[in-house]
Amino acid sequence: MTLGRFLVRRLLLVVPLLVFIAFLNFMLVRISGQDPTALIAGPTATGGELAMVRAELGLDRPLHEQFLVYIGNILTWNLGQSWVNKRSVLNDIWLRLPITLELLFWGVGLGALIGIPVGLRAARHHDGRFDQLARFLSLLGFSTPTYWLGLVMILVFFYFLNWAPPAMGRISLLMTAPPVVTGSYLLDGLIAQKWDVVQSAFAQLVLPVTAMAIVAAAPIIKQARAIALDVQGSEFVRSAQAAGLSGAVIRRMVAKNSATPVITFVGTELTALIGTASVIEYIFSWGGLGQWGLQAIIQADFMVVQGYVLTLALFSVLVFLVIDVAVFLLEPRAEMHA
Amino acid sequence: MSLLVVEDLHTHFVSRDLDNRVRTAKALNSVSFALAEGEVLGLVGETGAGKSLTAFSIMGLLRPPARIVQGSVRFAGQELVGLAPEQLNAVRGARIAMVGQNPRGALDPLTRVGEQIVRVILAHQAVSREAARAAALEAMARVGIPDPARRFRSWPHELSGGMAQRVLIAMALVNRPTLLIADEPTTGLDVTVQAQILDLLRTLVREMNMAALVITHDLGVVAHYCSRMAVMFAGRIIEMGPVEAVFGTPRHPYTQALIAATPENLTLDGASPLGGRPPDLFALPPGCHYVDRCPIATEACNALPPWRSVAADHGALCHRVES
């Protein structure tokens, strides 16, 4: 099967998946027991006013009708507007998605950059000093609550040592934001060649990205180690040793054969850590998608919640698609399973 | 002079149980044998007797918790036990080669088969890539792979078991080793392919004047392809001698039972399968390991049995055998 046909098949599968997610998400929000009308109308609203608000939001109509309207709107790129501040949901997603992705990609990227080599090396020295240290660090990373880690980092590196800037957003408050190209201040600063912006954006990134990387690295170490141990135990490694191949050649062989499962795992991390990113965004006043979504859930802002969940679903689907393509390109056996 | 001398080899699995007590599985207990240049020795025994472990011990392929606790392996006068991996790598794949029991699992799934042969050549010979490639293609043709140039670019998963085993044989012989260890080379293959692979191995061993250690649980293979045989039981060689002598007048009660259980000796009114189970390697009897199943065991068998020679080159590890 060619890559093109593989992609078309995978993309066709995405459509029913997204419809199903939209439905599930729509129902969950509505049976959550939260009532936005009281929140919007205010504590002094009368029964008549509540009914008016309800009719305005369309909440008085039967559920299936509401859902069909919602799907119809999605198909015309209309994700509705926030009931709290009347802003367009789609606009806010476009604005905030790059902000979250910046945190997520740097964090998970750095976590993978640390986690994969550490995991592979730990497997090579199975049960040795390095392995024990790696296992301990991984366990430590696993068991550290993200919000605590973020707060402690701010306390130590900003409050005590004053090495880091205050955790107030993505750029110094005194700085003018560069013209938006990618949505990342770091990259936009580089494009605009504003070095003070780049420096400030970088300084702001260090703490949240490090927190993210620590949370991401712990499971990556554990998985990369387990995967490499599994590969090392396989028969072809023993037969390579029997053939007298050098340690370096065998190490390369183990790394190459570990690549597919490790890449797959890092991809799932990318989608799984969006929740963690939301917490970090809150602590560092990051202003991304996660912070926005959490706020909407608390305020029963249904349209925003729906838009938020749909974006995450679409993001996950895209990540898995990229993983599948990578596996397809790396694995000579892939075409048999596709 | 002997090419390979294995002397008093003990390989144990040392691990700790949940209460942190040391547990030792004595998988090889004083294995000794020698192999002359050009000689083909068959090593037989039931599953778990220690046949493959003997091969892994010789090749330095043991993985924790298995390790050699005592004994020596001398190859062409050089002691192999305790050698560093880099020094072992000068021997492995170059002067001793091994063919295993699961050919498709023994190939690196992410490297084209021809490249894998080239890799083995380049690990041991100072030749150019082109020369290695030519040698690989020649070796592939020699082991009967049709259209080697096309097969060179195949992925392992595209090969049948028999074809994969041919690739591994090519890989084993490409550096012209003087000793080949064939560890159940036909176990995973179709019956029709088994004979082809065995015949190929025999032809190549003869042509290249190699010595071979053929590990099998198939007495038929030993009878057809080996000149001498050793029978293993619970980590010991319990009988060794020329194939005709061992088949003709087996001395050890276990060997007798083993030969009586082969399909050739089955009759309509009575198969004689081997009774009992192999002993627990964690709690071996102090004397003869076969004592619990032996029909002729006496009180004396609870002491370590002596090696009793019945001929110059035929003997058994048994109290009840008369020298």
Image (cartoon, coloured by chain):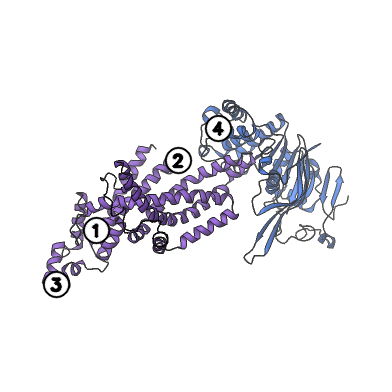
- Residue B217 spot, x, y in % from top left: 68, 46
Chain under callout 3:
A
Quadrant showing the C terminus of chain A: top left
Between marks 2 and 3, how big is the CA–CA gap?
62 Å
- Chain B tint as drawn: blue
Q: Would residue B41 be found to the left or right of residue B310 on screen?
A: left
Chain under callout 2:
A
Between marks 2 and 1, how big is the CA–CA gap?
39 Å
Question: Of tags 4 and 3, which is closer to the observer?
Answer: 3
Q: Is residue A330 above or below residue A266?
A: above
Between marks 4 and 2, how big is the CA–CA gap?
19 Å
* Circle 1: element type: helix
- Residue A171 spot, x, y in % from top left: 31, 52
Res B106 → quadrant: top right
Q: Along the polypeptide, which appears first: circle 3 or circle 1?
A: 3
Chain corresponding to purple in the figure: A
Q: Would residue A58 be found to the left or right of residue B117 on screen?
A: left
The foreground one among B189 and A278 is A278
Q: Which residue is mark 2?
A: A330
Marks 3,1: beta carbons within 8 A: no
Q: Which residue is mark 1?
A: A304
- At 57% from the left and 53% from the top, the residue drawn is A130
* Circle 4: element type: helix
Q: Identify which amino acid the numbered label 4 is placed on.
A: Gly
Mark 1, other Cα within 10 Å: few <14 / some 14–19 / many ≥20: many
Chain under callout 4:
B
Res B123 → quadrant: top right
Q: Which residue is mark 3?
A: A45
* Circle 3: element type: loop
Q: Identify which amino acid the numbered label 2 is placed on.
A: Leu
Q: Along the polypeptide, which appears first: circle 2 or circle 1?
A: 1
Between marks 3 and 1, how big is the CA–CA gap?
24 Å
